[in-house]
Image (tube, coloured by chain):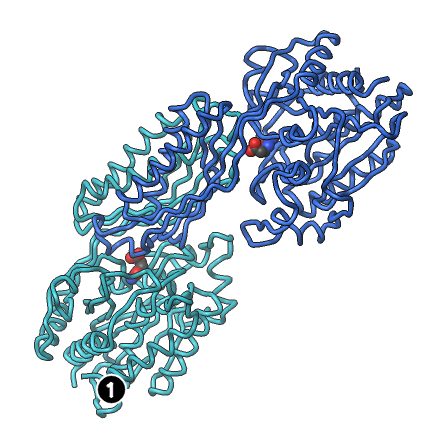
Chain colours: A blue, B cyan
Amino acid sequence: KVNGDRLWDSLMEMAKIGATEKGGCRRLALTDLDKQGRELYIKWATEAGCTVKVDQIGNIMATRPGEDPDLAPVGTGSHLDTQPSGGKFDGVFGVLSGLEVVRRMNDLGIKTRHPIEISVWTNEEGSRFAPAMMGSGVVSGRFTLQEILDKTDVDGIRLGDELERIGFAGDTPVTGRNYHAFFETHIEQGPYLEAENKQIGVVTGGQGQRWYDVVISGRESHAGTTPMHLRKDALIAASQLVLKVEEIAKAHKPGCGTVGFMQVSPNSRNTIPGQISFSIDLRHPEDDQLTAMDADLQAAVEELAVSSGSDINLKQIWYYAPIPFASECISAVRSSAEALGYSHMDIIAGAGHDACYVSDFAPTSMIFTPCLDGISHNEIESTTKEECEAGCSVLLNAMLVMAGE
Amino acid sequence: KVNGDRLWDSLMEMAKIGATEKGGCRRLALTDLDKQGRELYIKWATEAGCTVKVDQIGNIMATRPGEDPDLAPVGTGSHLDTQPSGGKFDGVFGVLSGLEVVRRMNDLGIKTRHPIEISVWTNEEGSRFAPAMMGSGVVSGRFTLQEILDKTDVDGIRLGDELERIGFAGDTPVTGRNYHAFFETHIEQGPYLEAENKQIGVVTGGQGQRWYDVVISGRESHAGTTPMHLRKDALIAASQLVLKVEEIAKAHKPGCGTVGFMQVSPNSRNTIPGQISFSIDLRHPEDDQLTAMDADLQAAVEELAVSSGSDINLKQIWYYAPIPFASECISAVRSSAEALGYSHMDIIAGAGHDACYVSDFAPTSMIFTPCLDGISHNEIESTTKEECEAGCSVLLNAMLVMAGE
Ligand SMILES: NC(=O)NCCC(=O)O
Ligand SMILES: NC(=O)NCCC(=O)O
């Protein structure tokens, strides 16, 4: 087992960077705070004897040498960026679990045949820059480096420029990466482990996602003088679509549908909104169901364009099909949990994770741990030292299984 | 009749300050652009022989002396501030009509018994700082000076500080103001004059308004891992209320109901919105109907709080009952339109206007002119030189009726 106290202390130390009043973290991708988090991590990894490299999309790779330098590393890692009002554990737990694995191997003088590599992936959250899982997506080849460098945030700031600015536009190529196996520990972010009273989630795959940008264009006019029947109120149409997204998700259990981002223009109390920009996020563990949700959405948009008289532009900006993890890695996680005497259950990841994209080019699985009330993407996100220690101990064992002592 | 070309040229000159790409104006209250507009106006008024004063809330009064200095002035005026994406005429037409009246009196060497006073009222739009008609509202006593100075915009900037900053915190008291009569010319901003093919709207009063601030608090959580039935999505509840506001307005013809402003928090694509702040604007020409709309809104909010499980805070921030104008002023407008041979009709103002508040302490009416497709609070707001000339000529005549040659 790992040193739960040390892991917890590191989590609490990292959480100071971007700490929010309600006990959460705001450390958006490629901001000054993200830079500070990255620098603290590099300091710790170096102190633990790792060699650190940064690649062209800003991913940080810390390597503990193996006995056979020709073998591909066994990898782990996650992300340090957070939601605008995020928690202390989402992502960070996966990164610092990797660090604790290395520290524990050092404590015990363990040597592995394969090198051990801990990655910090750039912009996993997809909140400041959409879509999510960009660093791992570039390495897996799902995205080209250039398209990602050219992404802009809501203020028009270019990702590539931010990467340069914070000093994390590295020179290690994003191509040709390889792992013998990859594991990511993460809080579940959902309610199932807690409901089933299990310590470990053996993650067998991730559900599929479709993200969209929508722009509804009505007609601005005066809130006091424009009779109700002569309006083209873009917010009325947007509200109808928000409710439709919920309806579509509920009709495709256990799918999810969410509008999380919305901007109203001109956003003046006494002007009928002329334009609404918003996001739609659809998810389902089965691809044919996700396709059906997409079809329902397209149909709803067509219908609404007619009924509202507004112009509706729906653009899919991201899609990936459900991702099955590798059976040998799933087994390594399950057997490690059993060996350590932790209760466990198989689970599908509801969130996207860097492991999903790593799984494109390397055998991969994930280790989930419970979080209080299943709440994540919220400052009150909470888990315990014991839960973290359990997840990290399973990681250590699973990595040892694959890395060979 | 007035000099329509000169009036039009002044309108086009003023429209350059804050001109937008689509031919409109963005000159928000108490910004640098508002300051520039005010300064241009003061230059013109001074050139036309007026004495200029600024009061404690930043209203600008330009006075052309009368023959009897003891008599109360006959007033006119409107506002120079605009919506975020406003037109060239809303407000400005009323101010520059006043200026053209003075210029025309000067051309013709007309002397009046009563002084003529043209006011530029501070923050009529209520867009940057809510509510609307602040300058006239402070002078009428509807608002205290202090409460208005302490209002803040969405970025927390204080109105009083902005007034100081742009150099328009004057020293003329806001109390004790008086008019023998007051007239305001304005584009109709609605569709009725155009539909009835009339040149002049004889405004008999203004409809009542209620403005609200709403905050809906749900629970932030992850868009991919939170099952639909476990969500407290504040945007779902807000969308339902937006549609309810429309329904309430439609059920109380010819009432209006609008949500023009909305802010989503944390506004992240993959986080279920935890908090939505938005405005509601309800209007009706009859007070008992406006009261009924308010009651329907309160009931809808109570119901929604239960059905959504979210916390809903509804706060009325502004109310005024429908305002009847003074019969002698209405008659002066009507008879001037007839004398000049303009087609006309009686009309109720759908928008709030400074004249509504001036009417608290002085006999008042308004003169409306058509605008293209009834569209205002939009950059494409449009009217013609001839329409402006007609409205301004009626103003000249009505003011002469009351000011005594
Ligand atoms: N783990 C996590 O919250 N990832 C963000 C990407 C997503 O929305 O699934
Ligand atoms: N005239 C005008 O647009 N006034 C703004 C105040 C209102 O919303 O009625």
> Which quarter of the figure has residue B128?
bottom left
Above or below — where is A371 with respect to B146? above
Disc 1 chain ID: B
Is residue B57 something that shows in the picture?
Answer: no
In the picture, measured across the screen, residue B150 lies left or right of residue A190, that is left
Q: Nearer the viewer, residue A345 or A313?
A: A313
Identity of the residue drawn at 16% across and 82% down: B404
> Which quarter of the figure has residue B87?
bottom left
Percent position of residue B288, x then y: 17, 44
Point out the image quarter for the N terminus of chain B. Answer: bottom left
Percent position of residue A328, x then y: 70, 16
Quadrant for ligand 1 reads top right
Q: Amino acid at mark 1?
A: Arg
Q: Nearer the viewer, residue A51 or B295?
A: A51
> Which quarter of the figure has residue B348?
bottom left
Is residue A301 something that shows in the picture?
Answer: yes
Q: Nearer the viewer, residue B316 or A158?
A: A158
- The residue identified by callout 1 is B104
In the picture, measured across the screen, residue A65 lies left or right of residue A176, that is right
In the picture, measured across the screen, residue B83 lies left or right of residue B154, that is left
Q: Nearer the viewer, residue A29 or B50?
A: A29
Give the structural element (helix, strand or loop) at label 1. helix
Identity of the residue drawn at 83% across and 27% down: A71
